[in-house]
Image: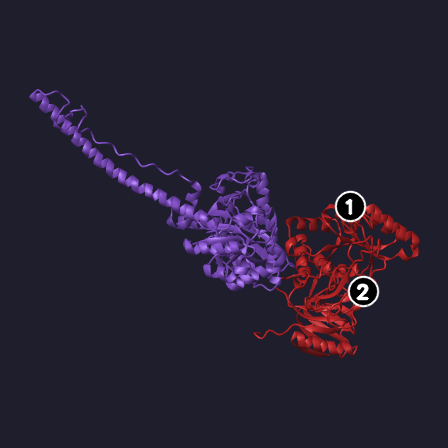
Amino acid sequence: MIRSLLPFGVALLACAASARAQEAMILHADGVIGPDGAVIPDGKILLRGDRIFAVGADVPQPAGVKVVRLHGVLAPGMIDAAAGVAVQGEIAERAFRNNAGLRAADALDLRHRYWQAALERGITAVHVVPDPARALAGDSSVVRTGAAVDRMLAPRARAVVSLVASGFADPVIGPTAVAGALEDLDAAIARAPDVWRGRKVAVYLDSAEGARAATQRAREQGFDAVYLAWGDVGGYGRELAGALVVLPAIHDGDWSARLLETWKRLHGAGVRVAFGTRSGRGGEVLDGLRTTAMAYSRATGDPAAAMAAVTGNAAAIAGLDDRGRIAPGAVADLVLWSGHPLDGAARVQAVMLAGRTVWTAPVDEDE
Amino acid sequence: MNPLSLRGALAGALALLLLTPVVSGQAGGVVVYKADAAWLDAETRIAPAYVTVRDGEIQAVSARAPRGGRTVELAGTLAAGFVDAWSGLLPGDLLAGNGGPGDEQVRDGLPVDLAGADPQLAARVAAARAAGVAAAYLPARGSGLQRGLGTTVVFSANDLPTPAGLEGVDMATGSGRGEGVAALTDAGALTEALVQAETYREAREDWEEKLEKHAKDLEEYAKKLDEYVAKKAKGDKEKKDGGGAPGQDEGDKKDGNGKTESGPPKRPERPKEPSRNAERELLLRVLDGELPLRVHLGQAHELRELIAIKERFELDRVIAVGAEEADLLARELAAAEIAVVLAVAPQHGSRAAAERSLAVRYRRLTDAGVEVALASGGSDGAQGLLLLRAGELIAAGADPAAVWASLTEIPARLLGLEGSHGRIARGARAELVLFQGASPFDASAPFEALPGGRR
């Protein structure tokens, strides 16, 4: 076995070279965030190509496999569970009563500097969701961050439905109420039941009425449904026990004691939370994804749930079954942090996408 | 008794005292907290840490085990509790009021420190303490330019606020009073208020001078009166002896019109006292350096006025509260040595919050050398945001030691609690927090408060 102890950047670059050659290699870090969200001290990840083969305190060490020692904590790349980033204006089409054919992917500027900024903050994928301007709002898309050309992971990730009356209320185009939106949804299902059966759906909600109707249809139609919380989720969150729900990441002006209490109650009710920035307003919003997870950890006392909210749960929201966790079979989208990602002082040291190192932090000249 | 047996008995009693287990935090008991480490202040760390506490006060701090006391082992790092330099932990009637007079004193409105005296307030204080807050400033909440006399408080065993540290004169100008007309019409109002206080002082001093003169005049008058009485008595006697009419002498002759030529001296009139003004007297205490001036404001032009006021009136202690545009004048504020209290909870109607995040504003201020205290901002329950937003600042690149000082040492100094709060040191109150992980800002690890040195 070849063993090396290298600075993280060099080490990961070396690792990338190996990954390109489809070789196996072991990443040995001070800590690895395991499949359950807990830190494995002195953890190891066995990579084969772009996939994780094994993870744990001890992993199989095939002969000749290189071990790369890394200082810091390896975590799954964060995933923004609902964003409206790098687009011109809104992802909506106001000319039609329904926009079932709209694709968020078509509105994206993949050359926008946002994508690289997201990568450098440890965000490796973004679920871009149409606005709730129509009852049938279109299809969401999933994009890998960074500057590579081919980054579209899923152009049609989920059919997005809006039951947010304030989102689509239009006296000319309509509908103007949740009941009207449900009529549209039911009509669409009746027209093409085979298309909708088993479909991945994301439903915008802002009321208990909408939550009850959405969960009922999900059961009846066999949707794989997730929910995008709009408005005051404290008022209807209990309807979503056990469900996957996207909550807005906190922006600077959104902090309140009530919000923390709402999170506690949702967590206690068994709601599986993911966070989405919802907006593409630059770096501070991107920073908000991690700091929201930090706050969620403090509010609930459950760091694993907080990590899941920006990794595994967010991946499930985006329909990415093989991302968002460090587990055998998962794609090796990894971020090396200088400490635990929920430690405010931790910084991103390097980012690996599908087993390739795509970014390393500039070396501080003072060090 | 045999002296040896007496000595033995005393030694035995002493040993018994030292070995007697005490309940953590119990009055009179000595407890030694042994932790993995301690942050004594923003810069100083020791590991391991032994913090000896008696009656809620830190008796000793050491990296070596002290003798005596019951040792309680704690997993993690000890640090001082937070000092909330702008809090809303006020009794309900003070919170609900529409604003009292400009000389209202918060201290007078606090409940008596008895269990059950104000259960609602006690519950809110307990929640704040559980969030790590060890002391707070409770501002006066009047609606005018001058709001009254706020007070620093610590928390009793009944979870009630009790006055400690410095009081402060709270004022609010322009945007600090809200939106609308008040925000536009207050230009120069702060200066005017202080000028009026000086004018009031001059009027009082003028009156006091007159009063002194009046006292002298009274002495003079008394002399003249004595002379008059003596002279009159002499005249009366002479007349009596010489057969003249009583009550008439040479100095008391009537002229041709029958008027008295000379009578008793006229008593000098006491100068009229200018009416007292309690609001202006509070401001005089600010001008005399007895009390800090805390001005709630937001916009840059108001801060400019505050800077000018500090210079013009040579004020020692001026604190800008809220001050959401303070970062725009960071260098000027640093040069003027005006401290800034930033709220972690968004304030209603804030423009700056929409334009520049707390992280940006904090960084600009601290980079310029302004003393910044982070505070809950008076919102109910917002104490729970202090640690979270501090973590956000650090995630955005702020120096952890500076942020920690903004939660502890700096507000303690602003509130006059530097000897008792904000640091772990001998003589300080044992208002502690305990964290695991790399720092208190590591949200992957537990954090808990030990209010009053109790778990």
Residue A208 numbered mark, or none: 1
- Nearer-the-camera pick, A315 or A180: A180
Residue A106 numbered mark, or none: 2
State the colouring used for the structure image. Answer: by chain
Badge 2 element: helix
Q: Position of residue B266 (x, y in %)?
A: 23, 31
- Chain identifier, colour red: A
Residue B441 seen by the camera: no
Chain of the residue displaying label 2: A
Lateral position of residue B98 relative to residue A176, left or right: left
Mark 2: amino acid: Asp
Q: CA distance from mark 1 to mark 2?
A: 32 Å
Residue A339 numbered mark, or none: none
- Chain identifier, colour purple: B
Q: Quadrant of the N terminus of chain A?
A: bottom right
Q: Quadrant of the C terminus of chain A?
A: bottom right
| Residue B225 drawn above or below residue B71 | above
Q: Residues within 10 Å of mark 1 (few under 14, many from 20)?
A: some
Mark 1: amino acid: Ala
Q: Position of residue B202 (x, y in %)?
A: 36, 45
Chain of the residue displaying label 1: A
